Image (cartoon, rainbow, N blue to C red):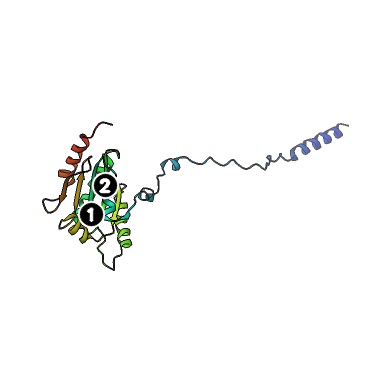
Amino acid sequence: MRLSLVLMSFALLSGCAEQPKPAPAVTNETPAAAPPSTETASTETAPATAVAATVELNIKSFDDLQSLIASHKGKVIVVDYWSTQCEPCIAEFPHLVALHRKHPAEKLVCISASLDYSGLPSRSLEKCREEALEFLKKQDATLTNVILQEDDITVLDEKLKVPSMPVVIVYGADGAVQKQFDESKEPVSYEKLIAPLVEKLIAELPAQ
């Protein structure tokens, strides 16, 4: 009898020892994806072309330009006749852009008038416009930009009656020319000559 009990106890113990451990539960769930990082989005900047896209250059005649100037009567107006082929023009152009940014549009209007078109068959008006527009985009020149359809010699000799560029004309709020700056008298300088005159004229505008 004792022998039977001993054998039965041994069998039970052996069965418990050999019982396999339960396998870990397996589910069909996949780990939740980590939320997208907002760090990259917060540091991203607009494409470099976004600013350049706001820069325009329209083809106009000299008479069209005069009508445009007259339409801004009541404001101080700066018109800069320039060309990508004119080194003094290129050197002074950033000052025109800075002047445009400094003052509100209801007080100051800055207009750049490109004289890049020379009338040569090898350089069409559209080709000259593309080259001038490329420069304007690099300058972030969001002011009013036009390229004149008359050739540069016609504009300088017959319209403005000056020997060369740059030519900058400042108009008062009454629409009259306050002063014309050109190389025939003294070097054109925004910092020394043009900006001080513009500041004075803006200060004299009636309060709005």
* Residue 188 visible in the shown view: no
Instruction: Tell me the residue at 15%/44% (across/down).
Output: 193
Instruction: Tell me the residue at 20%/45% (across/down).
Output: 170
Q: Secondary structure at mark 1?
A: strand
Q: In the picture shown, does residue 138 fall above or below 33? A: below
- Find residue 177 and report its image quarter: top left
Please give the residue where the numbered disc 1 appears in the rendered image. Answer: 82
Q: Say few, some or many: other residues with alpha carbon within 10 Å of mark 1 (under 14 / 14 to 19 / 20 or more).
A: many
Q: Secondary structure at mark 2?
A: helix
Q: Amino acid at mark 2?
A: Ile
* Residue 200 visible in the shown view: yes
- The foreground one among 204 and 86 is 204
How many marks the image carries: the answer is 2
Q: Which percent across, then down, holds residue 135?
A: 29, 55
Question: Which residue appears farthest toward the left when viewing the image?
Answer: 185
- The foreground one among 92 and 26 is 92
Instruction: Tell me the residue at 86%/34% (across/down).
Output: 4
Tell me the mark number nearer the camera, choosing from 2 and 1. 2
For the residues labelled 2 and 1, say whether their Cβ atoms are less than 8 Å apart.
no
**Quadrant of the rendering where the N terminus is positioned:** top right
Q: Amino acid at mark 1?
A: Trp
Q: Which percent across, then down, holds residue 121?
A: 28, 68
- Find residue 194 and report its image quarter: top left
**Quadrant of the rendering where the C terminus is positioned:** top left
Q: Which mark is residue 183?
A: none
Q: Which mark is residue 69?
A: 2
